[in-house]
Amino acid sequence: MEQKKLAIIATKGSLDWAYPPFILASTASALGYETEIFFTFYGLQLLKKNLNLQVTPLGNPGMPMPMGMDKWFPVALTALPGMQSMMTYMMKKKMADKGVAGLEELRELCQEAEVRLIACQMTVDLFDMNPSDFIDGIEFAGAARFFEFAGESDICLYI
């Protein structure tokens, strides 16, 4: 029986969107899937050596907020200065309290599990990013390279 394949396209660079690609990829790899994540546009932030990701409640009506704030706190007030930092702190604390692995740990787990992490070369060039800012062990390639794998994958996710 041929090994199943999972292809993931990661496009978001915020804290709350950073977890799904790494959790899904590491789980798939543990289940025996050959797995590859293609990081493009803002998703490239997830491959940086120094992660400084934020979460924002603004424009995210599904975000559960403490003290039932999502029920009574006006959405417009989430744009106030300091709210993004506060929400990021609260999210990180909640994850730590619940024993959720950190992003660096999940990313390393993926690499140990031989998940291929591919940085979109076109986006790196577009945003004048320095390849030395990225973690070791990743591949720089274009969409055509990713499509070779994605076209044969059993599951393809866009995150």
Image (cartoon, rainbow, N blue to C red):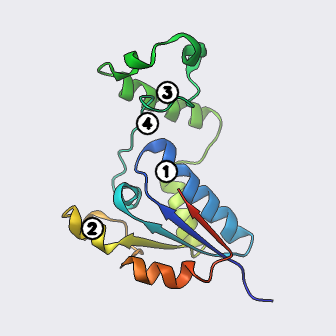
Q: Which mark is residue 90?
A: 3
Give the camera-side residue of 54 and 153.
153
- The CA span between labels 1 and 4 is 10 Å
Q: Could you tell me which residue is drawn at 22 percent across and 65 percent down?
A: 126
Sequence-first disc among 1 and 2: 1
Q: Nearer the viewer, mark 1 or mark 3?
A: 1
* Cβ atoms at labels 1 and 3 below 8 Å apart: no
Q: What residue does disc 4 label? A: 55
Sequence-first disc among 1 and 4: 1
Residue 115, position as x, y percentages in the image: 56, 73
Q: Is residue 128 left or right of residue 124?
A: left
* Cβ atoms at labels 2 and 3 below 8 Å apart: no
Residue 51, position as x, y percentages in the image: 37, 50
Q: What residue does disc 2 label? A: 124
- The CA span between labels 4 and 2 is 23 Å
Name which quarter of the figure residue 69 lies in. top right
Sequence-first disc among 4 and 2: 4
Q: Which mark is residue 18?
A: 1
Q: Could you tell me which residue is drawn at 47 percent across and 78 percent down?
A: 146
Q: Could you tell me which residue is drawn at 49 percent across and 50 percent down?
A: 18
Q: Secondary structure at mark 4?
A: loop
